[in-house]
Amino acid sequence: MHILVLSFYYPPDIGPGSLRAKSIVDALIEEGPSDLKIDVITTMPNRYHSLDVSALKHEEDGKVSINRINLPIHKSGMFDQAKAFVSFSFKVRKLILNKKWDIIFVTSSRLMTASLGAWVAKQTYSKLYIDIRDLFTETIDNIFAKKFLHVLMPLFYKIEKWTFRSAHKLNVVSAGFLDHFKKITPNLSPSVYTNGIDKIFLEKDFSIKETKHKPLVLYAGNIGDGQGLHKIIPIVASKLKDIQFRLIGDGSALNLLKDSSLFKSQTNIELLKPVLRNELINEYKKADILFLHLNDYEAFQKVLPSKIFEYAATGKPILAGVSGYAAEFLREKVEGVEIFNPCDDRSMIFGLQKLLNGPKIFNREVFLTAYNRQFIMKKMAKDILSII
């Protein structure tokens, strides 16, 4: 059996897409037949231009052959991302010439990676399994609502319909996406294999062992328009001088945050570049409260941020500015969480003070067992293999 895994991100690059792609490759090797071979086509590490990560262009690792594509230098803006993807797609087309696979597996947050996978599957007469990590069209529709580029939305919706109807099977990481797919693929019911908790988190002790002058609130992840940190962190920090805010990450909205006059006037906000996972775990250990926030876009009513699983694994209190399905999931599944309406500084302050006066560590053993990534990916690997 021969499988192609197509992912824009793959280790040693960082981020949820990279971790998910690697975990499914590992699970396919474990669950697949003895003659299984996997080709991975991905990019050279590029998620954050501020993080210098090196990797081999071609790598053989047992049953896995990895081809990494060089991209033009880019940042996180929409135009740069489009330019990078065009370069990626042209090089993918060259790599698939005269090749044949039984299954094409593609994991995609941006619609175009999934569309590229659908095109590859048709060119190679392969079965197609698409893993959807975000609702690209709804997100873009919200972001472009008052911009000229909104005229492109009919094109994006046509591409979306063609892509998802080309699949033999679909998976979504959030059950909140299911209603969206009922309209697009009425004859194909997606499975729901969420993100999960990696073994490295289950082996660590995250209890605080150092004394600090100020409580530390930590955010770690993408700093884009989707997270909307620029809309809330400077305001809350200006009102809570006795609390330290540490933000680790990079993204398209970084300058919106840094260039804010309110941000510049605060002495209790640290802004650090992205770090690799071992270092990030050490930062989690130092934190008193872990912070999560999504912008107040309608599209984010349906998402389930991957960061929830890492945060929950630490046992630390979680302060979450989310609504919709993510809020529902947290209330039902995770102890020690205060939820507030996105971009609402008053309710954020109320929730933060409540957490500071509560327990420092929560027992989340039931959640850790239920959302063990290795267990989830094993089931998903069997689902992928079942399409042959």
Image (cartoon, rainbow, N blue to C red):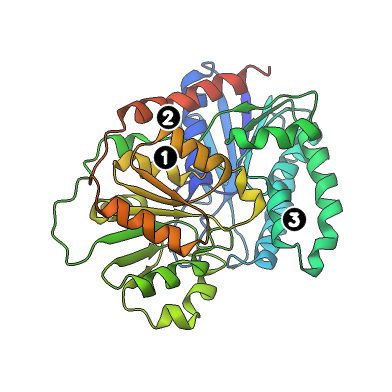
In the drawing, does residue 368 fall left or right of residue 139?
Answer: left
* Mark 1 → mark 2, Cα distance in angstroms: 8 Å
Circle 2 residue: 371
Residue 230 is situated, as x and y percent measured from the top left of the image, at 51, 69
Q: Which mark is residue 309?
A: 1
Residue 208 is situated, as x and y percent measured from the top left of the image, at 18, 50
The answer to whether residue 170 is visible is yes
The mark nearer the N terminus, 1 or 2, is 1
Q: In the rendered image, which quarter is residue 283 located in?
A: bottom left
* Mark 1 → mark 3, Cα distance in angstroms: 27 Å
| Disc 3 residue type (three-letter) | Asp
- Disc 3 crowd, CA 10 A, few/some/many (<14, 14-19, 20+): many
Q: Which residue lies at the image location 37% right of the left edge and 54% below the top edge? A: 351
Dot 3 falls on a residue whose secondary structure is: helix
Q: Which residue lies at the image location 60% right of the left edge and 32% below the top edge? A: 175
Q: Quadrant of the C terminus?
A: top right
Front label number (3 vs 2): 3
Q: Are marks 1 and 2 in contact (CB under 8 Å)?
A: yes
In the drawing, does residue 106 fall left or right of residue 330?
Answer: right
Q: Quadrant of the N terminus?
A: top right
Q: Are marks 3 and 2 in contact (CB under 8 Å)?
A: no
Residue 220 is situated, as x and y percent measured from the top left of the image, at 40, 57
Q: Nearer the viewer, residue 154 or 233?
A: 233
The mark nearer the N terminus, 3 or 2, is 3
Circle 3 residue: 141
In the drawing, does residue 372 fall left or right of residue 256?
Answer: left
